[in-house]
């Protein structure tokens, strides 16, 4: 039986933990030099990293054998509960059936209207020459949009909505490091721990109160929560769980917020930064916006015609996939590639690593939206070389929501503004549970759209 090669330079006791905390992206990209499947050590925990699209695809598609679980997901569930993104395979099908009606095509016309109204409010408030911290600016769009389409302002109240968004951001901010630290450290009375606990307690209290209000009314308010609180799954009638529990509803809100707000804000901010250094791409994007948009505003019906914006977002997802590191637990003895793995083994795959392989994506560090000519946004090739939203039965349920919002925002910004990096700006990844940017400071210049 072939033994899985060990990644170079493990430290005593710590293994490769410091490398993954200090320079995680460079560390991940170095793993294929060691092998197709590579053993990485986090203290006493062994994790086997799938470094090829074939192995990653096997892990993604066989969700029974490679299930959610293990110490990393245990820590994530402590934060986000047992929602759709963290529940094990045995519970996933039921939850997905209950949530799926909220993500049907019939709902997206309403969602897109909320998106474009908020994009217009934020982008229309920019001033010529001001310095914008772009990721927080995009969060102003995406966080409000997610919370409005998920839990209407009438359920939270105008004073509670900003607090829920702030608390959610506090919880997400420290998620990555908490994944790798022992849970015993959560009880150390550090300021960061106190902030996290306060935010979690207040968040769950506010969301619980909002859910109770939804249960007390009968009408469909055209948002996600209206669907979720009334969703019934008759296939689960035998075990008496035809509806989502309040705990599950809170977990879904937390999960969808992270996927729909922070990750999408990161995608838009990265995209605007990338096109600023490519005048030809920016010009094509602006011309498309002038031709498609009416008075600088877009709608859901415009998405098929925003092809340049779609390619820009797809290429941004290749370079900076929000869900950059994912782990699974092996539920039974199995074979992954040429290696035999025991039940209980930990397996990981990284969309970032797969997306940056030169044999799959020539000149992988180059921003080249035209490599996606003829494809639709974020469409995963059959060979599994593009997996920004995962795949199989556990593919992100909100992928269309995220890409639609990103494309609409990109087009509406292009219709009004040209953005350039501010002097001294140092854009770089800020790793939490998501691959989001920090240091993207840009200066807008108003443009006069040329109608053709």
Image (cartoon, rainbow, N blue to C red):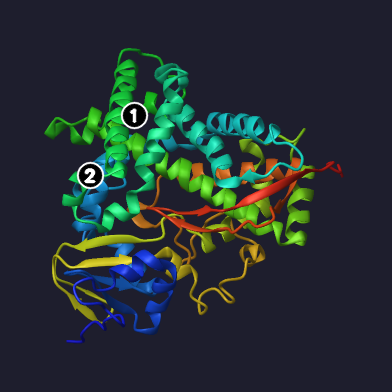
Check the image and report above or below for 368 versus 215.
Answer: below
How many marks overall? Answer: 2
Residue 157 is labelled as none
Give the mark nearest the N terminus, 2 or 1.
2
Q: Position of residue 102 (x, y in %)?
A: 41, 33
Q: Nearer the viewer, residue 5 or 44?
A: 44
Please give the name of the residue rendered at 28% of the width and 25% of the height, measured from the top-left corner: 205
Q: Residue 163 location in percent, x, y?
A: 41, 27
Nearest the camera: 230 or 322? 322
* Mark 2 vs mark 1: in front: 2
The residue at the far bottom in this view is 2
Q: Quadrant of the C terminus?
A: top right
Residue ID for mark 1: 228
Q: SS class of the residue under badge 2?
A: helix
Residue sitting nearer the eye, 225 or 265: 265
Vertically, is 240 above or below 212? below
- The quarter of the picture where the N terminus appears is bottom left
User: Does dot 1 land on a helix, a strand or a loop?
Assistant: helix
Instruction: Please state the horizontal and vertical placement of residue 238, each as a whole percent of the image.
Output: 13, 33
Q: Is 90 left or right of 62, judged from the image as shown?
A: left
Which residue has dot 2 on it? 78
Few, some or many C-alpha atoms within 10 Å of disc 2 (few <14, some 14-19, many ≥20)? few
Left or right: 308 in relation to 104: right
Q: In the rendered image, which quarter is residue 249 located in?
A: top left
Q: Residue at x 45, y 30 (%)?
A: 147
**Residue 89 in view of the camera:** no
């Amino acid at each position: 039986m072939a033994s899985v090669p060990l990644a170079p330079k493990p430290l005593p006791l710590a293994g490769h933990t410091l490398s993954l905390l200090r320079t995680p992206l460079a560390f991940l990209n170095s793993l294929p030099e060691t092998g197709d499947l590579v053993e990485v050590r986090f203290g006493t925990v062994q994790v086997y990293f799938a470094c090829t699209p074939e192995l990653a695809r096997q892990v993604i598609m066989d969700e029974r054998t490679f299930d959610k679980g293990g110490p990393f997901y245990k820590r994530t569930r402590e934060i986000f509960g047992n929602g759709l993104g963290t529940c094990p395979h045995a519970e996933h099908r039921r939850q997905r059936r209950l949530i799926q009606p909220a993500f049907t095509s019939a709902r997206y016309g309403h969602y897109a209207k909320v998106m474009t109204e908020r994009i217009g409010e934020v982008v229309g408030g920019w001033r010529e020459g001001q310095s914008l911290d772009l990721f927080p600016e995009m969060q102003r769009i995406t966080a409000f949009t997610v919370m409005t389409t998920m839990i209407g302002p009438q359920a939270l109240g105008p004073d509670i909505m900003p607090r829920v968004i702030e608390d959610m951001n506090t919880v997400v901010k420290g998620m990555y490091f908490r994944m790798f630290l022992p849970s015993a450290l959560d009880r150390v009375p550090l300021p960061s721990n106190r902030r996290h606990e306060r935010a979690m307690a207040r968040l769950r209290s506010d969301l619980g109160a909002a859910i109770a209000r939804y249960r007390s009314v009968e009408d469909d308010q055209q948002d996600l929560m209206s669907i979720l609180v009334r969703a019934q799954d008759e296939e689960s009638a035998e075990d008496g769980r035809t509806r989502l529990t309040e705990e599950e509803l809170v977990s879904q809100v937390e999960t969808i917020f992270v996927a729909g707000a922070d990750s999408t804000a990161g995608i838009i901010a990265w995209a605007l930064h990338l096109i600023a250094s490519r005048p030809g791409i920016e010009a094509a994007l602006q011309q498309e916006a002038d031709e498609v948009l009416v008075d600088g505003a877009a709608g859901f019906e415009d998405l098929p015609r925003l092809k340049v914006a779609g390619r820009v977002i797809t290429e941004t997802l290749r370079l900076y996939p929000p869900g950059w590191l994912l782990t699974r637990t092996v539920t039974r003895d199995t074979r992954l590639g040429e290696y035999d793995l025991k039940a209980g083994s930990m397996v990981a795959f990284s969309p970032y690593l797969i997306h940056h392989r030169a044999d799959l994506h020539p000149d992988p560090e180059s921003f080249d939206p035209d490599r996606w000519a003829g494809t639709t946004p974020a469409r995963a090739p059959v060979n599994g070389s593009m997996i920004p939203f995962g795949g199989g039965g556990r593919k992100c349920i909100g992928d269309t929501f995220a890409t639609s919002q990103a494309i609409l925002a990109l087009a509406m910004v292009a219709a009004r503004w040209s953005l350039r990096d501010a002097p001294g700006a140092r854009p770089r990844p800020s790793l939490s549970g998501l691959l989001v940017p920090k240091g993207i400071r840009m200066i807008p210049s108003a443009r006069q759209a040329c109608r053709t």
